[in-house]
């Protein structure tokens, strides 16, 4: 059985850009929802000050994560000026190509990539 993978992107919201970030993410939801059917979860959360945000992604397997990453460079570049990378977290057996991409992006931004590759139990439930 394939193991689920969770990927968390952490960002700082540019000063005064909270509403623009929310609008841009809403467009991303529509695009990801329509073009990445194996992405089981794609959700963003803001802290209470509106200055930090996290995007939570969940995938049923490594293939779904790899497909989600297709085109991610272009999607990320469209957010320049709205959010600034603060770090990444990966939980589960992510494909090496995806981890390499995240390592490059983290190194370029001077931030940390945390990887927890060994799943010890749990499940990702598909909608009924």
Image (cartoon, rainbow, N blue to C red):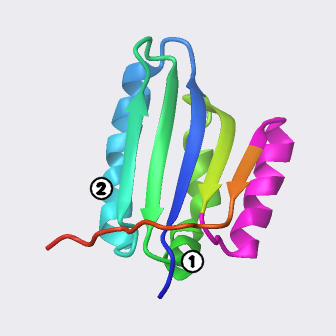
28 above or below 6? above
Q: Looking at the image, which residue is at 55% across and 12% down?
A: 15
Q: Is residue 120 above or below residue 49?
A: below
- Assess whether mark 1 and mark 2 are in contact (beta carbons under 8 angstroms): no
x then y, percent, for residue 53: 49, 30
- Residue under pointer 2: 30
Q: Tell me which residue sits at (53%, 76%) in the image.
A: 67
Around disc 1, counting alpha carbons within 10 Å, would you say few (fewer than 14), some (14 to 19), or many (20 or more)? Answer: some
Is 122 placed left or right of 7 in the picture?
A: left
Instruction: Return the residue at label 1.
Output: 62
- Local packing at callout 2 (Cα closer than 10 Å; few below 14, some 14-19, many 20+) is few
Q: Earlier in the sequence, mark 2 or mark 1?
A: 2
Up-down: is 13 above or below 38? above
| Relative horizontal placement of residue 41, taking residue 109 as reference (left or right) | left
Q: Position of residue 94 (x, y in %)?
A: 64, 70
Instruction: Tell whether 43 sits left or right of 116.
Output: left
Q: Is residue 26 magenta?
A: no
Question: Which secondary structure, mark 1?
Answer: helix
Check residue 6 in the rendering and tell me which mark sits there, or answer none.
Answer: none
Image location of residue 40, percent across then percent down: 35, 66
Q: Give the quadrant of the C terminus.
A: bottom left
Check disc 2 and report its element: helix, strand or loop.
Answer: helix
Q: What segment is highlighted magenta in the picture?
A: 92-112
Instruction: Return the residue nearer the eye: 35 or 44.
Output: 44
């Amino acid at each position: 059985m394939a193991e689920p993978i969770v990927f968390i992107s952490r960002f700082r919201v540019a000063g005064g850009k909270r509403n623009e970030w929310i609008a841009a993410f809403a467009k991303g939801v529509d695009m990801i929802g329509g073009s990445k059917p194996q992405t089981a979860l794609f959700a963003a959360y803001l802290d209470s000050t509106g200055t930090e945000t996290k995007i939570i992604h969940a995938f049923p397997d490594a293939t779904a994560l790899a497909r989600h990453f297709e085109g991610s460079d272009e999607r990320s570049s469209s957010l320049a000026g709205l959010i600034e990378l603060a770090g990444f977290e990966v939980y589960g057996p992510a494909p090496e190509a995806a981890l390499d991409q995240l390592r490059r992006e983290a190194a370029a931004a001077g931030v940390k990539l945390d990887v927890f590759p060994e799943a010890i139990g749990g499940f990702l439930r598909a909608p009924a």
